[in-house]
Every structure is written in C-alpha cells, then in structure tokens.
Image: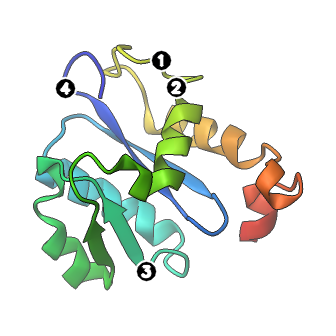
Amino acid sequence: MGKNRACILTLVDRKTGYLMIGKLSARTIQQTNRRLRKLAERHPEKFHTITADNGCEFHGYQQVEQSHGLEFYFAPPHHSWERGSNENANGLIRQYLPKGMCLNNLTQAQCDRIAHKLNTRPRKRYGYRTPEELFN
C-alpha cells in the first residue's frame, strides 16, 4: 500500500520464486481482479492456485476462479508465515518501493522492471540460479 490510494499486487510462484508485480490505482475488488487476470494471462501454465491474505480487495475472488480456472486459498488472519514466498518477495520489493512511498506515479512498466531485476537475481535456495532460469 502506498500513502494514497495506489498500491501493488504481487504474485509469486512458490516453486520457482518467479515474481510478477501489478500496479493498482486503488485497492478495490474491480482493480484487483482486473490486474490478477492480466498477470495470470502472462503465464497461465504456472498459476493454478493463489493464496491470498484476507484483504477486502480479494472478496471478488470467485470471479477470477470462474474466468481463469484459478483456485483461491486464504491464509488465516495474522498468519503471514503461511504465505512465506510472497512475504519474502514483498520484502525484496521494499528495496525499490520503500514503505510509505506514494505509488500514484508508479507505472506498470516500472513494476515490470522491478520484477525483472528480482527475477534475474541469483538465489541461494536455487543453487545461485535465477527464477527466470528455473521458470523457462
């Protein structure tokens, strides 16, 4: 969440750590579903399930499940460790988008560049290979 209404949505493939970031101009069900669909369509073979937090922006999850065949799961409130890959990715994103930063002027192209930087960064857990190497 940014200082104003704009925020980002992150999707992380748990197995490979591959990250996609979506810009939302507002934290609404409509904005979230629209961006989720666009991100999921980039790599439909990789995303079959999504584990979300309990934010109100995910209350329209049934629409995405029906239109894209994705299955949603929800972590219990205050159980962020059940979404560890996503929480780790969010921490890495903070290097580029510090907490409290206004995200109104952030573009989807900038989000894609940040995701690319993180996806081309070698990871110890993968023998210092990158998520892109594992993903492709």
The residue that disc 1 covers is: 98
Q: CA distance from mark 4 to mark 1?
A: 16 Å
Q: Secondary structure at mark 4?
A: loop
Q: Is residue 93 above or below residue 59?
A: above
The residue that disc 3 covers is: 48
* Mark with earlier residue (4, 1): 4
* Mark with earlier residue (4, 2): 4
Disc 2 and disc 1 in contact, CB within 8 angstroms: yes
Q: Looking at the rendering, in which quadrant would you find the C terminus?
A: bottom right
Q: CA distance from mark 3 to mark 2?
A: 27 Å
The residue that disc 2 covers is: 94
The colour scheme of the drawn protein is rainbow
Q: Nearer the viewer, mark 4 or mark 3?
A: 3
Q: CA distance from mark 4 to mark 2?
A: 18 Å
Q: Nearer the viewer, mark 4 or mark 1?
A: 1
Q: CA distance from mark 1 to mark 3?
A: 30 Å
